[in-house]
Image (cartoon, helix red, strand yellow):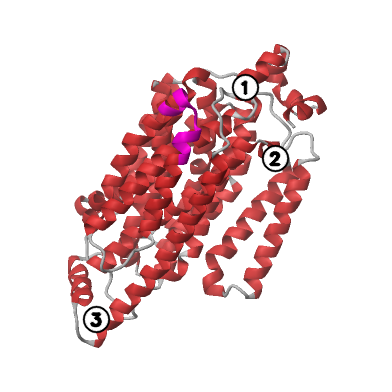
Amino acid sequence: MTGVLVLTVGTLLPLLDLGVLNVALPVIQQQFGVSVDAAGWVVTASLLALAFVVPAAPWLSDRFGLVRLYVAALVGFAVCSVLCAAAWDLGSLIAFRVLQAVPAGLLPVVTLSILYKIVPASRIGAAMGIFGLGLVVAPAAGPTVGGFLLLHAEWRWAFYLCVGLSVVTAIAARLGLPTLPRAHARSFDWWGYTTISYGLFAVLLAASNGQDWGWASYPTLALFATGLLSLAFFAVIENEVRAPLLDLRTLTRFPYIAAVSTVAAVSLGLFASTLYLPPFVQLGHGLSALDTGVMLLPQAVAMAVVVPLSGIVADRFGPRWPAIVGLVVAAYGTYLLSGLSIDMTKADVIAWTVVRGIGVGLAVMPVVTAGLNSLPYQFIGFGSALLAIVQRVSCALCLAVLVSGRHVAPPTAPALAPDMAQDELRRLTEQETGLAGLWWRLLLHVTASTYGDVFLVAAVLTSVAVLLVVRLKKSRPASMRVIARIPKTVFVPERVDQESNSPSSRARLN
């Protein structure tokens, strides 16, 4: 399991970085003297850049080799983190964050592909349970780590932390991961890459700026229309070319569709609680970043305990019941979060997030494992890339839906970071009389209502996902079944690509 732990750390790095950075955004805003919306581009720009990186991950894996690409991505993430820590203004920080998105987009795709190659089929569920710690615990633990760093250091240490973890993980991967055969390099699908990259970028950009531009404005509608049209062209192209960039035949397997849908629904609520619950608690209750992180820590602990157990349970009893029970509990916990208000107590937040964390930890990895197990061996890379795209798109759309809630401060409201500002916010929040206090409480009520609506939508989507997982069955990885009935010559590394795109192979998959 040493290799699984190495892959887990590589997966959690980008998500931990995102969670920590979210807590530090108010401090960055004050230090650089920029608006809330401008500071938000530190997160949004990197999410937009992922549209150009993740689709190319399977081809890069074939071209350079999985382990080599994984180590290179870790080193690149470390170098870009150093640049981010050295940023001298907001523009440079955004530019370096865009560069950091390149290795950050490769890591989740490459790690899943390596995992399915180095772990025996009989232990894949337990391995995915450990691997899932990076996917669900890192976002939940980010606010706590960020609060601790802001209390004892400055926001730049959020990136220095990633540098150390990246370098250590790169060395461990280089020494500990086995050498994997490199597949024959496919020709690069430029038309597919262009259409999916532009399509994702246009849709995400329109969603991120729709509130400011106006949802019915010409730029917003033009981006949505051209983006969706480009994605439609991508689907047509991928079904015709010999070597597709992302083989969409993965979407013909129902367990994989259930996995994609579950990831989308869960990611919406997970990123909503990670990106916007901490700032709201700081605004409404005058808590420091560290106090906010400590309040959200039980959620991360609950996930850390449940996620590995979910893999063991799924290995023994199948993915159906862990997924059903987990999604029901997650939907209930997300519904509780829809009751967000300035009158809620710390105990309420802890209880709501812990309930949701237990459900998410129990459900996600069994469903993802069942989905990937349904794919043939040579399609794991495609499946991993599509899952990463869905998760990132869900995060970006979450940002877009909640963008109206970012304008919560009155024009004269103080900055968030200093202790004096926190005392002032607490005074305004607790003030029972006076126009300033009433105005501030009104804005907080509006913000709570906006966030509550998003959690309610996430709860409904999570409930719908329950209907999809009821059909899941216990099964070993499909690669084992394919190997049992296809001649071994098909799986010689240099022939995987040609065979996987031959007419007979397409018939077997469909």
Residue 207's tag is: none
**Circle nearer the N terminus (1, 3):** 3
Q: Are marks 2 and 3 in contact (CB under 8 Å)?
A: no
Q: Quadrant of the C terminus?
A: top right
In the picture shown, does residue 25 fall above or below 197?
A: below
Residue, disc 2 = 248
x and y percent of residue 328 in the render? 44, 46
Q: Tag 2: residue type?
A: Leu
Residue at (36% x, 57% y) in the render? 336
Tell me which segment is drawn in magenta: 313-324
Q: Amino acid at mark 3?
A: Gly
Residue drawn 20% across the image and 71% down it: 426
Residue 242 sits in quarter: top right
Closer to the camera in the image, 145 or 84: 145
Residue 336 belongs to the span the image colors magenta: no
Q: Residue at x 28, y 70 (%)?
A: 415
Mark 1 residue element = helix
Q: Secondary structure at mark 3?
A: helix
Residue 430 appears at what percent x and percent y?
A: 19, 75
Going from N to C along the chain, the mark reached first, 1 or 2, is 2
Q: Is residue 504 above or below residue 10?
A: above
Res. 428 in view? yes
Q: Residue furthest top?
A: 488
> In the image, 355: left or right of 418?
right
Mark 2 packing: few (<14 Cα in 10 Å), some, or many (20+)? some
The label shown at residue 479 is: 1
Q: Is residue 260 above or below residue 198?
A: above
